[in-house]
Image (cartoon, helix red, strand yellow):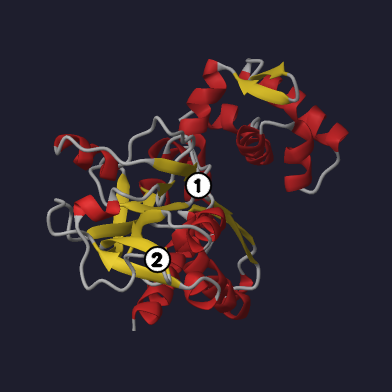
Amino acid sequence: MNLQKLTRLDLNLLVALQALLEERSVTRAAKRLFITQPAMSRVLQRLRQQLDDPLFTRSGNELVATPKAQDLQLRLPAMLDGILAMVSVGEFDPASYVGEITIAVPEFFAISLVSRLIESLSVSAPGVVLSVLSDTDSVERELAEGILDFAIDIDKPLGTDIQATHLVNYSPSIWMREGHPLAEQNSITLDEILEYPFVQYYLLIAKRVSARTDARFDKTLRKLGRKRTKALVTKQFMTAMETISRSDCLMVAARYGHTIEENTYPIVRKGFPDDLPHEQKITLVLLQHERTFESPIHRWLVSQITEVIMSKED
């Protein structure tokens, strides 16, 4: 190990580099680290000299990472987390932790989770700032790069560097307003539901959606030689809820309970038609990258998130 070379490297520069990689803006990175924009510009100049690379080029108001900076973005979060874990001696005290935790959560799930999680954190860890996103370009990549600390998604095969903690199972169902022509029936058929237009609401994390994007429901229908009519395609849960509560539109969603439609929207949920093949159980999991496995704050938050969800299930 070249200790002499390491003595010339300021650890604070690496912290600043991580902020620049996440924010892609000198101004936003400066605000994140509570320093002025000119000071951050000087830090960036020092980084360029130390690492012998431009690190970023400018495109409009955004910074675009060079190949070397992109490589550092993959390795830097794990290194900084390791240093933080090393210097965090003694038993972890969530009450003394100060920092931001970023989690990607599907909106339909965030509605019932986030407010109760904040209620818990405000008492036990008031220094935690929770940043919640509902879309991402790539869950695995953004977890690896440190853009995300956690993500909640359906259980599916992922890389060995991603750990999945079971959260909850839910069954798919057909949602409709109270008073809908199908609402009073004990069961519904495929022919009956296809007589009505659908709101295509994306339950899970998705960056871009359009009417041309097929959901699982569409793929199943195609195998049967059938197709549904779409009236609305959206990632906005409240927009979807307003639409089905004011029309005869149907929506495929989870049977897992939410507070918003119970208190605000009079919604009836029906099981899938018997003549429509479907998964009986869909599992949601909490995802994190291996760089956070030994982090005290991340381990503690996993327990808090699962506890909040279990209390909801009870």
**Does dot 1 land on a helix, a strand or a loop?**
loop
One can see residue 112 in this view: yes
Query: Residue at position x 53%, y 75% from top?
Result: 116
In the rendered structure, the answer to whether residue 177 lies left or right of residue 16 reads left
Q: Position of residue 152 (x, y in %)?
A: 40, 55
Badge 1 or badge 2: first in the primary sequence: 2
- Helix, strand or loop for disc 2: loop
- Residue 187 lies, in percent from the top left, at 20, 68
Residue at the image position 48 percent from the left and 44 percent from the top: 232
Question: Residue 219, how many percent across, how many down?
Answer: 24, 37
Three-letter code, disc 1: Lys
Which residue in the protein does label 1 denote?
235
- The front one of 80 and 6 is 80
Q: Which mark is residue 180?
A: 2
- Is 299 above or below relative to 80? below
Find the residue positioned furthest to the bottom: 314
